[in-house]
Amino acid sequence: MTTLASPPRLIGSDVEVPCVDGVDRRYVNLDYAASTPVLAAVWEAVEAFVPWYSSVHRGTGAKSRISTEAYEQARTTIANFVGARTGTTVIVRNTTEAINVLAHALPPCTRVLSTPAEHHANMLPWRRHDLRVLPLPTSQDHLLATTLKALQERRTDILAVTGASNVTGEVWPLQELATLAHQHGAQLFVDAAQLAPHRAIDMDALGIDHLALSGHKLYAPFGAGALVSRSPLTGDPLIKGGGAVKLVTDDDVIWADGPERFEAGSPNVIGAVALAAACEALDMEQAEARELALAARLHAGLEAIDGITTYQMWPTHHDRVGVATFNLAGYDHHVLAQRLSDEFAIGVRHGCFCAHPLLTHLLGVSDAEARRLYAELQAGRDPELPGAVRASLGIGTTAQEVDTLLASLMALQTR
Ligand SMILES: Cc1ncc(COP(=O)(O)O)c(C=O)c1O
C-alpha cells in the first residue's frame, strides 16, 4: 500500500474555539470552498519578502526593482501552475474580478454560451454580451449534447463554464468541452475557483483558453487572484488609470500591450508573491489523492444518515471534489450551520452559495414560491431564502474531522 506524505502545514490548524457548553474544542474547518487557511510556506514567503517590499513598475530604487521582479516572476509561476506555457497572466483581486476583466475586454455583443449551474461570478459579467444559457445539465452527457447543439445552432465566441461546481463538487468534462468549442470556432473560459484548489490543471493539454482563480481559495489569502489566457489579451480594460497605458494625451489614450493594460493602479505585489508561493508549495497530485478518500468518506457518510438530503446535479457522476451540500430534516439550513458551530466547533457554510438558479433547481423551489420571494425582495422586504449547508474539504482535512461532522449530524438528527 502506498502511503501519502503528510500535507503541507497550515497556519491556525490547531486553534480551539469556545462552544456553548463552555468547553473549548479544536476548530474543525470544513469551509475550504469559501476561503482556505494560509499555507505555512506562503506565510514564510510573505515574511521573507516584506523587508524588500516597494512599488512595482514605478521606481528605480533597488527595492522597487526587486519588487517588480518578484511581481513579474509571480505571473510566470501562476501560469505554470495551471499549465499555460504561453499567453498573458493578469493579476487581479479574485475570480470575480478576473471574469469581469475578461468580459469587459471582449468586444460588445460577443456571443457567449454558458449554463445555469454557474456561480454568479461566472454569470452576471456575461450578461453585458449576447449570452445564451443552456438548460441545466442533468448529466455530463446531457451537458455535452446540449452544448454541441447550441454550438451548431449559433456561432459562439466564448463557452464559459465552471471547472468544478461550488455547490455539488462535480468536476466538469473540460477537455471534451474544449474540443467541442474549438471545433465550432469558440474559445473555452473556465472558472477554476473550485477546481484549482483540488486538481492539477494543464490548460495547454486540456485546451482551456482562459481561466480564472482566487488566491484566497488556494491557501494564499492576500488579495490576489489571476486571469490566465493562452493568447495575448487586448480590448478595453475594466479598470482605467495609471500603469495601464503607453501614452495619454488630452483626449486619447494608448493602452499598454501586456497584462499591465488590465492592472491599472499600484499592483498588489504581496498578494502576487503569496499566490506564487502557494503555486510552488502545492502538490496537486498529492492533494487530489488525499482528498479522494476523504470525499468518498464524506459523501457515503452523509447518505447513511437518516433525514439527510444531499444535492447533486449528476447523481451517477463520481468525479467530484470534496464538496457536499445537504439539509437535515427538522432544521433550517442556518440553524443547522449555527448548531454545528456552537455545539461542535465545526465551520461550514450555509445559504445559496452565490448560485441562485442552481440552488432553486436542486431544492425544488416551485415557480410560485420563487415568484413570491422575488416579489417580496422587490418590495424591499427581507424574506427567509431557501438554502442548504455545505461542507468542503481541503489539504488540511483529516478523516477524524469528517467523522466529527458525521457524528455531530447524527447527534442533531436524534434530538
Ligand atoms: C465556482 C466559483 N466561482 C467564482 C467564485 C468567486 O470567487 P471570489 O469570491 O474569490 O471572486 C466562487 C467563490 O466561492 C466560486 O466558488
Image (spheres, rainbow, N blue to C red):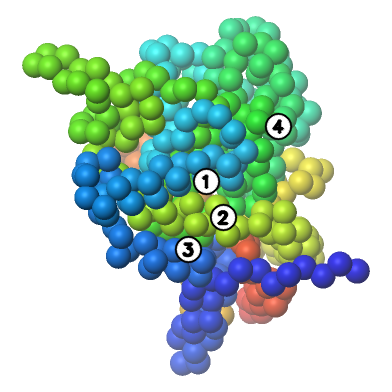
- Whether residue 159 appears in this view of the structure is yes
Q: CA distance from mark 2 to mark 4?
A: 20 Å
Q: Ligand 1 within 8 A of label 4's CB?
A: no
Q: Is mark 1 within 8 Å of ligand 1?
A: no
> CA separation, marks 1 and 2?
7 Å
Residue located 8% across and 16% down the image: 250
Q: Nearer the viewer, mark 3 or mark 1?
A: 1
Say if mark 3 contacts mark 1, CB within 8 Å: no
Query: What amino acid is found at the position of numbered circle 4 in the picture?
Result: Ala
Q: Amino acid at mark 1?
A: Thr
Please report whichever mark, 1 or 2, sits nearer to the chain's N-terminal start. Answer: 1
* Structural distance between the alpha carbons of marks 3 and 1: 14 Å
Q: Nearer the viewer, residue 90 or 327?
A: 90
Name the quadrant of the N terminus: bottom right
x, y percentage for residue 334?
Answer: 49, 63
Q: CA distance from mark 3 to mark 2?
A: 9 Å
- Inspect the image, locate mark 2, and give the three-letter code of the amino acid beneath it: Glu
* Tag shown at residue 280: 2
- Identify the mark at residue 93; answer none if there is no mark: none
Q: Quadrant of residue 235?
A: top left
Q: Residues within 10 Å of mark 1 (few under 14, many from 20)?
A: many
Q: Residue 79 placed where, x, y %?
A: 54, 40
Residue that mark 1 sits on: 77
Q: Point out which mark residue 205 bears.
A: 4
Residues under numbered marks 1 and 2 in contact, where contact means CB atoms less than 8 Å apart: yes
Q: Which residue is mark 3?
A: 42
Relative image position of residue 318 (x, y in whole percent):
79, 47
Q: Quadrant of the C terminus?
A: bottom right
